């Protein structure tokens, strides 16, 4: 009975989160097949530790936290060889290799932002990506990164400051703006739905950055 | 540019959308993956899975134990009581009688002079990062995984205070080594910040603390030091200009150089660079030259020169400095996109953009 309950829970978890997890990995790795590796590894961990996977909304950030560790090991070339996970991932490789990349070629501005992101500390980069690529709320970011929930807003503010500096002189300090959004209040407004919608909109809008940021260095 | 603008930029830099991901799952047998995983026995194999889940989710989420917090507080009080020096930077240099600053390269001394020359007088807190952007700069002190940041920026102080007090808790003033700071707590958090003005700059010291009292005790550890002491406190990751030629030579190990490539230009850098930034500069100088050779040769129909560039750049994933940088950033990944486009012969990345349009901003050529 215990096993069937666990299996049912795992199946629900898998169905609910596989696309989000594959997206998380694919946005951080070059090849879809590598992303498949990560998905297989993470769900193997989740199945083996199903009793530790949080319930409800914390499950997704928990999986992202595991995925972050898996990817870090993957990049260091220190990934443990889990034969089962490898065999499972192999079943996906052939199909995923054939997927054409429909994403528009990145503009210079996008490459500039990616380069600046690449020069941030790992924690600063992950804060920004979890918020803007994965659409997580501050509370969810705290679960994914294992940091106190109350510090996410201020850490996020500092990560944005670091990114501005990496981007160069065309991106002024927030104190030069009267926009209340730029104020570092440290208060969670709870308006996560709006931010997720914004992130989803801009991610898929396909608008050119050039028109808005002609003063980029 | 406000926070929303920054978030917008980051969101637009996402390489692939969830809608495209959903299409992947339609064409690949992800259902089989789920069933195959569940066909295994759900018993943890500690050596395989523990490393992925143990790192942050318990220790970091719940913070330090009460015992470690008490110990940290006692240690902070025990090492407080830094002297109030209150001297300007130039005076400090001249009156110190310490001419050891002449041992440092002139640009590095200039960098130090532009900084507030403030350190935490507590051996447990070590400088782990220092950087400078025009007239602004920042450094990070680390103590057993706990960070404290010191920023120096342009004013006016009132603007920064207005920003921090907008929703923050005002804990009043506190005398620090070179001024009087206003202490602010970020509402609902254990994050504190202190802002004060000194020598024409606005200084800000930020960290998490158990209480306003503990934060004030950390403020008390700040002291002004000599240029030599400040530069000596820089972490190993900060490359001092005097050391740059040797470090650059080491970073070039294993990298095939184009004919006539002059490595001496690489050492002519007045900024303090951390190792990643310097590595990016070195790799960019070489890679951009090879890419330019490939672009020119391809346009001219010189297949020999073009192939030489391809042969050189296809080894880039094996360059020791790239392998080192891959541990802390994505520069190597961006470079590999360009290498793949060269090797394909078309120069097109992701099937559309030509590397001639992207390589300079993407790789930092000429910076």
Image (cartoon, helix red, strand yellow):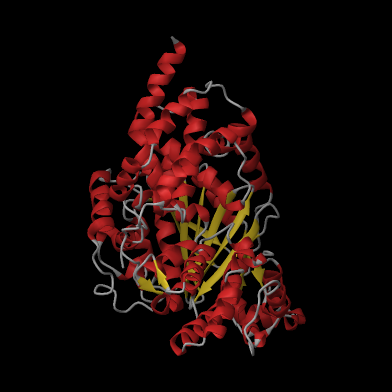
Determine the image quadrant of residue A184.
bottom left
Residue B171 appears in the figure: no
Relative image position of residue B246 (x, y in whole percent): 73, 77
Q: Is residue B37 visible?
A: yes
Q: Residue at x 32, y 71 (%)?
A: A176
Q: Position of residue A125 (x, y in %)?
A: 46, 56
How many marks can you see? 0
Rendered view: A157 above or below B32: below
Name the residue nearer the viewer: B52 or B297. B297
Picture quadrant where residue B183 is located: bottom left
Name the residue located 41 percent from the left edge and 15 percent from the top edge: A5
* Residue B60 percent location from the top left of the image: 54, 39
Q: Nearer the viewer, residue B81 or B347?
A: B347
Q: Residue at x 45, y 69 (%)?
A: A166
Instruction: Return the residue nearer the eye: B4 or B89.
Output: B4
Between B94 and A151, the residue placed more toward the observer is A151
Q: Quadrant of the N terminus of chain B?
A: bottom left
Position of residue B188 measured from the top left corner of the image (x, y, whole percent): 38, 42
Above or below, B45 against B332 in this view is: above
Q: Is residue B82 left or right of residue B246?
A: left
């Amino acid at each position: 009975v215990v096993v069937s309950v666990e299996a049912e829970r795992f199946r629900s978890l898998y169905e609910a989160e596989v696309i989000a997890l594959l997206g998380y990995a694919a946005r951080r790795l070059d090849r879809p097949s590598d992303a498949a590796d990560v998905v297989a590894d993470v769900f193997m961990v989740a199945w083996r530790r199903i009793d530790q996977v949080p319930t409800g909304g914390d499950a997704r950030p928990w999986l992202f936290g595991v995925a972050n560790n898996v990817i870090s090991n993957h990049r260091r070339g220190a990934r443990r060889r889990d034969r089962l996970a490898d065999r499972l991932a192999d079943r996906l490789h052939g199909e995923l290799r054939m997927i054409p990349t429909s994403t528009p070629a990145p503009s210079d501005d996008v490459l500039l932002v990616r380069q600046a992101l690449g020069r941030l500390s790992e924690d600063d980069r992950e804060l920004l990506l979890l918020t803007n690529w994965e659409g997580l709320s501050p509370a969810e970011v705290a679960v994914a990164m294992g940091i106190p929930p109350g510090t996410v807003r201020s850490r996020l503010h500092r990560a944005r400051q670091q990114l501005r500096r990496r981007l160069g002189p065309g991106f002024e300090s927030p104190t030069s703006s009267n926009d209340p959004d730029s104020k570092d209040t440290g208060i969670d407004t709870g308006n996560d739905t709006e931010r997720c919608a914004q992130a989803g909109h801009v991610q898929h809008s396909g608008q050119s950055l050039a028109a808005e940021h002609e003063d980029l260095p | 540019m406000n926070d929303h603008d920054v978030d917008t930029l980051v969101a637009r830099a996402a390489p692939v959308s969830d809608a495209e991901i959903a299409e992947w799952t339609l064409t690949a047998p992800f259902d089989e993956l789920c069933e195959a995983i569940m066909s295994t026995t759900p018993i943890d194999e500690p050596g395989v899975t523990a490393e992925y889940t143990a790192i942050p989710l318990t220790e970091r989420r719940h913070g330090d134990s009460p015992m470690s917090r008490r110990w940290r507080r006692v240690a902070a009080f025990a090492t407080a009581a830094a002297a109030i020096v209150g001297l300007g930077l130039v005076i400090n240099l001249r009156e110190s009688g310490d001419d050891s600053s002449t041992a440092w390269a002139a640009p590095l001394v200039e960098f130090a002079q532009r900084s507030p020359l403030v350190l935490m007088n507590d051996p447990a807190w070590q400088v782990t990062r220092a950087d400078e952007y025009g007239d602004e700069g920042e450094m990070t002190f680390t103590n057993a995984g706990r960070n404290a940041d010191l920023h120096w920026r342009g004013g006016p102080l009132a603007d920064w205070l207005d920003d921090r007090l907008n929703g923050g808790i005002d804990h009043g003033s506190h005398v620090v080594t070179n001024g009087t700071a206003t202490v602010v707590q970020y509402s609902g958090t254990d994050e504190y910040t202190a802002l004060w003005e000194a020598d024409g700059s606005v200084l800000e010291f930020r960290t998490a603390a158990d209480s306003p009292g503990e934060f004030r005790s950390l403020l008390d550890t700040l002291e002004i030091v000599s240029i030599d002491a400040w530069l000596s406190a820089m972490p190993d990751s900060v490359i001092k200009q005097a050391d740059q030629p040797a470090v650059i030579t080491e970073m070039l190990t294993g990298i095939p150089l184009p004919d006539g490539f002059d490595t001496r230009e690489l050492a002519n850098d007045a900024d303090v660079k951390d190792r990643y930034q310097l590595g990016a500069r070195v790799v960019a100088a070489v890679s951009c030259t090879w890419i330019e050779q490939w672009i020119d040769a391809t346009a001219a129909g010189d297949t020999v020169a073009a192939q030489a560039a391809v042969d050189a750049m296809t080894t880039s994933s094996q360059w020791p400095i790239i392998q080192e940088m891959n541990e802390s950033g994505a520069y190597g990944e961006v470079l590999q996109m360009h290498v793949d486009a060269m090797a394909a012969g078309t120069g097109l990345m992701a099937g559309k953009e030509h590397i001639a349009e992207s390589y300079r901003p993407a790789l930092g050529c000429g910076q």
